[in-house]
Image (cartoon, rainbow, N blue to C red):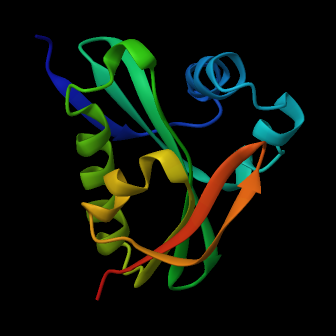
């Protein structure tokens, strides 16, 4: 099996790879409206990419809500690469990087079917389940310090 590599994306050159992964996962697989998926916030955000060998197979977007709070968004791994530890490697890299940046609070709107994945990393659900892009979500939060 090819080695996994996670790195910060270089914008704008990495946007085509990021958008391709999100297109396949969110639009094709999950039926999310492209106007919701591509909301114009990509250039003001940080992104990470995970590679299996030379192939980009996962991505995540990170937005700053304030000086100490980040929001994880658009966490996606290509369907054929799931179940191989790629999501775990990506999340571990995200949390380590945010800790280095001295972020103290991380939040997200997690898709409810994968809530348990995020709970394994210490995220706790907050509030009630709500619908976003036609998919049930739950707000989740984790304190890093």
Q: Is residue 132 left or right of residue 105?
A: right
- 115 or 24: nearer the viewer: 115
Residue at far left of view: 1
Residue name at image x 40 percent, y 21 percent: 57
The total of numbered circles placed on residues is 0
Give above or below for 66 relative to 81: below
Give above or below for 68 relative to 30: below
Residue name at image x 25 percent, y 27 percent: 83
Q: Is residue 101 left or right of residue 121?
A: right
Q: Is residue 139 left or right of residue 132?
A: left
Residue 7 image position (x, y, % from top left): 34, 39
Residue name at image x 32 percent, y 64 percent: 119
Residue 21 image position (x, y, % from top left): 56, 22
Residue name at image x 29 percent, y 37 percent: 6
- 38 or 109: nearer the viewer: 109
Residue 61 image position (x, y, % from top left): 56, 48
Please identify the quarter of the rendering in which residue 37 is found.
top right
- 82 or 65: nearer the viewer: 82
Please identify the quarter of the rendering in which residue 84 is found.
top left
* Quadrant of the drawing holding the N terminus: top left
Q: Is residue 89 left or right of residue 82?
A: left
Residue 75 image position (x, y, % from top left): 50, 43
Give above or below for 132 relative to 103: above
């Amino acid at each position: 099996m090819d080695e996994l590599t996670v790195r910060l994306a270089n914008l704008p050159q990495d946007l085509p790879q990021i958008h391709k992964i999100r297109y396949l996962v969110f639009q094709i697989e999950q039926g999310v409206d492209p106007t919701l998926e591509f909301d114009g916030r990509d250039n003001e955000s940080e992104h990470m990419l995970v590679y299996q060998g030379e192939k980009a197979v996962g991505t995540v977007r990170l937005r700053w809500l304030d000086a100490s709070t980040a929001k994880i968004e658009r966490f996606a791994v290509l369907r054929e690469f799931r179940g191989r530890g790629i999501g775990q490697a990506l999340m571990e890299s995200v949390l380590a990087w945010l800790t280095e940046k001295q972020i103290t609070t991380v939040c997200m709107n997690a898709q409810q079917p994968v809530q348990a994945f995020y709970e394994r990393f210490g995220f706790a659900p907050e509030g009630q389940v709500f619908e976003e892009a036609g998919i049930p979500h739950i707000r989740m939060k984790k304190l890093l310090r």
